[in-house]
Image: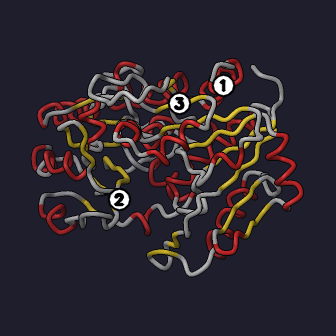
Amino acid sequence: MSSKLRIIVTGLIAQYPLGGVTWDYLQYVIGLSQLGHDVYYLEDTGLWPFNPLEGGVAKDCAFNVDYLASVMDRFGLRSKWMYRFPWRDRWYGLSDLKREELIRMADLLINVSGTLANPAEYRTVRRMAYIDSDPVFTQVKLARGQIDFQRMVDVHDVQYSFGECMSNKVPVTGHNWRPTRQPVVLSEWHPSVKYRELFTTVMNWTSYKPVSFNGRTYGQKDVEFERFIDLPSRIPGTQLEIAINAGKTHRTPRERLKRNGWRVVNPDRVCPDLESYRAYIESSKAEWSAAKNGYVVGQAGWFSCRSACYLAAGRPVVVQDTGYGCALPVGEGILAFNAMEEAITAIHDVEQNYERHAEAARAIAETYFDAEKVLTRLVDETLADTTG
């Protein structure tokens, strides 16, 4: 393992102060800290923040800053965060002097999800790694010639992707996309928690508009979910619950989902923050989830950050096939499907052999998603690659 390093991690914890988003980025920070590194969290998106209490764009950043500060305090990181509010270029957290020194002297910056508005401003950092957490869509944007986006990606020394094995349906971009996956801090997820008799998931109906390239369209989760809309009626005795928002580009058909047998709950109520999100996953029997249509079409090997947390909690996942079998074991703990009959068979298998699948789920998390393993590899590869 690398010696102690000064590392900056970027993310969207304050931008979108929601439970699932928080865990996505926080586990990088906690995991690297547990490895003994001097880790700082930085948020500089250039975007006006979202306030879930107001249901939209925030009037100011007070709620968002307070949320970020409380999360950092919770994990002993009180003096280890920075947040830039675009209005009048105001910074919160670390002092200007310490922030400027950090950016000048840091060994590594990990730009998770490409969240930095202008990563070139941080080029004094010794090494910079780009983490593509939205494979297929990222490559389509690059292949379509979005110059500003390409410049942002190219300023990094190394590019990683959650698309662990890109198929020939993913546009070629000229980058060396190294495989990586969500790090999970295993000690934060507890298989011993009592679960309810529910398969659940937390999801967006749509996140952004479909994109097209070379005659192919890469759509959102709604496209795939529609194929399984009557699944509850096909599995009597098993309850399926979805914590789903209103949808960003198309409205979530909540009433139609209910008529088709889905239990529909509001994520703002059942899992709005760090603790409640974890409790929601841990209190679930298993996960069932469709994937974004773009992930299914592209077959890049993407696997959900959320599903990785279910595995860590010892909860089996029945999740749509995106090609992830190239990198992860499938059949026990993780059950893949693409057709309706495959989804039904997988759910029945979990119900009939639950303990075996639950044990396999945690074992997969320990072998493949353990933050110590994922982040050690990420850091070592980034520092070892001096070719850019």
Q: CA distance from mark 1 to mark 3?
A: 10 Å
Give residue 382's mark.
1
The amino acid marked with disc number 2 is Ala
Give residue 191's mark.
none
Q: Does residue 99 appear left or right of residue 152 in this picture?
A: right
Give the residue drawn at x 52%, y 73%.
51
Give the percent coordinates (x, y) of residue 122.
71, 46
For mark 2, what is the residue? Answer: 243
Give the residue drawn at x 17%, y 38%.
215
Q: Is residue 182 visible?
A: yes
In terms of secondary structure, where does tag 1 sit?
helix
Q: Residues within 10 Å of mark 3 (few under 14, many from 20)?
A: many
Tell me whether the residue at label 3 lies in contact with that at label 2, contact meaning CB atoms closer than 8 angstroms: no
User: Quick one: quadrant of the C terminus?
Assistant: top right
Q: Residues within 10 Å of mark 1 (few under 14, many from 20)?
A: many
Q: Is residue 286 visible?
A: no
In terms of secondary structure, where does tag 2 sit?
strand
Q: Earlier in the sequence, mark 1 or mark 3?
A: 3
Marks counted in the figure total 3
Q: Does residue 14 appear left or right of residue 200 in this picture?
A: right
Q: Does residue 119 appear left or right of residue 292 in this picture?
A: right
Q: Nearer the viewer, mark 3 or mark 2?
A: 3
The amino acid marked with disc number 3 is Tyr
Give the percent coordinates (x, y) of residue 225.
20, 49
Give the residue drawn at x 43%, y 25%.
164
Give the residue drawn at x 50%, y 77%.
53
The amino acid marked with disc number 1 is Thr
Q: CA distance from mark 3 to mark 2?
A: 30 Å
Q: Earlier in the sequence, mark 1 or mark 2?
A: 2
